[in-house]
Image: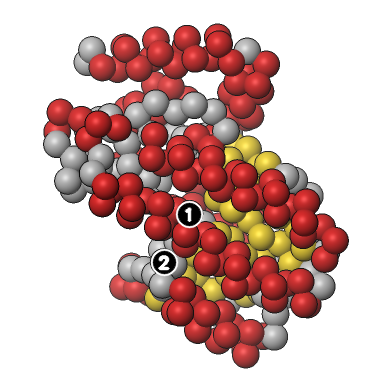
């Protein structure tokens, strides 16, 4: 990769594990100074200690707007700019929609949507003022195609796609770029820890098994991070990985009825297990 990221300042939310951690590692390998934020401060510190001197750990609940403001003010005070905001923090639940409580819906929307709005509303004006920047939203293939058994998650990710595409149009005038990451199944802890505590077993599913059935074997988060940074450098509107994710999206656009039939077939097969 080029020197595109060298000595730039990146802020990554949800950086304690999974995609956020993989992105942070890749950014640092490319010369970036990275602020890794996560609600789990202990896990985050353990990871940051392994990464290197350009990694900075910040404990942050993205749903806490005041805390978010304080974190951003700290970064601006130290570097006077933020070049990349990876709005990545999120949670994912899978299971029959009948099994979700109001509290489950609230938690997911608060983190996946309101937390992302907080980061955008706080940092986008700063990027406009500095005349540059790039906001990257971690969406999902589930934000582009119908996703049974992932209804609340897909709801939040569809909203992120709308936010990203619309803001991209506005922000261009200020030399601020906007991209949406749209992964298929990436091998992260979310695949094995995605059932709300309140959900009865009759409504729960094995997320890893289900997503493998409908979209293929989970791909490496480190490889995904490499592809994401390539896409960011090219200022792509959507960044897909693996290749199959883009193929499914295209299929949904041009043959939606056929895709729905295949999805229903997979769902029926899974429910009979």
Instruction: Say if residue 262 shows up in the picture.
Output: yes
Q: Position of residue 193 (x, y in %)?
A: 28, 46
266 in relation to 145, above or below: above
Q: Position of residue 106 (x, y in %)?
A: 33, 53
Sequence-first tag of 2 and 1: 2
Q: Which residue is mark 1?
A: 113
For mark 2, does the 10 Å Cα neighbourhood hold few (<14), some (14 to 19), or many (20 or more) residues?
A: many
Quadrant the N terminus occupies: bottom right
Q: Residue at x 48, y 54 (%)?
A: 113
Q: Residue at x 57, y 33 (%)?
A: 144
In this view, the residue in front, 208 or 161, is 161
| Residue 84 position by quadrant | bottom right
Figure label count: 2
Q: Position of residue 72 (x, y in %)?
A: 56, 79
Q: Residue at x 54, y 61 (%)?
A: 117
Dot 1: what SS? helix
Q: How is the image coloured?
A: secondary structure
147 in relation to 166, above or below: above
| Separation (CA) of disc 2 from disc 1 | 9 Å
165 in relation to 241, above or below: below
| Residue 174 position by quadrant | bottom right
Dot 2: what SS? loop
Residue 230 located left or right of residue 43: right
Which residue appears farthest toward the front when viewing the image?
102
Residue 220 located left or right of residue 27: left
Q: Position of residue 245 (x, y in %)?
A: 58, 30
Q: Which residue is mark 2?
A: 63
In this view, the residue in front, 33 or 177, is 177
Quadrant the C terminus occupies: top left
Q: Residue at x 34, y 73 (%)?
A: 41
């Amino acid at each position: 990769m080029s020197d595109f990221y060298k000595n730039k300042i990146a802020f990554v939310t949800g950086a304690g594990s999974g995609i956020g951690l993989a992105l942070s590692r890749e950014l640092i390998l490319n010369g970036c100074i990275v602020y890794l934020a996560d609600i789990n401060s202990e896990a985050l510190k353990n990871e940051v200690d392994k990464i290197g001197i350009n990694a900075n750990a910040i404990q942050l609940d993205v749903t806490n707007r005041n805390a978010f403001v304080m974190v951003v003010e700290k970064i601006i005070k130290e570097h006077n700019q933020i070049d990349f905001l990876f709005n990545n923090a999120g949670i994912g639940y899978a299971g029959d929609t009948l099994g979700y409580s109001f509290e489950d819906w609230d938690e997911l929307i608060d983190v996946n949507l309101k937390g992302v709005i907080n980061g955008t509303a706080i940092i986008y004006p700063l990027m406009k003022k500095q005349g540059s920047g790039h906001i990257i939203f971690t969406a999902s293939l589930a934000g582009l195609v119908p996703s049974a058994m992932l209804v609340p998650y897909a709801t939040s990710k569809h909203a992120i796609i709308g936010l990203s595409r619309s803001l991209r149009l506005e922000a261009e005038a200020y030399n601020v770029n906007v991209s949406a990451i749209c992964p298929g199944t990436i091998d992260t802890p979310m695949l094995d820890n995605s059932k709300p505590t309140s959900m009865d077993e009759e409504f729960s599913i094995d997320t890893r098994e289900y997503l493998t059935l409908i979209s293929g074997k989970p791909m490496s988060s480190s490889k995904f991070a490499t592809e994401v940074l390539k896409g960011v450098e090219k200022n792509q509107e959507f960044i897909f990985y693996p290749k199959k994710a883009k193929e499914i999206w295209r299929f949904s656009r041009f043959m939606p009825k056929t895709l729905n039939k295949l999805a229903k077939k997979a769902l029926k097969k899974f429910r009979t297990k």
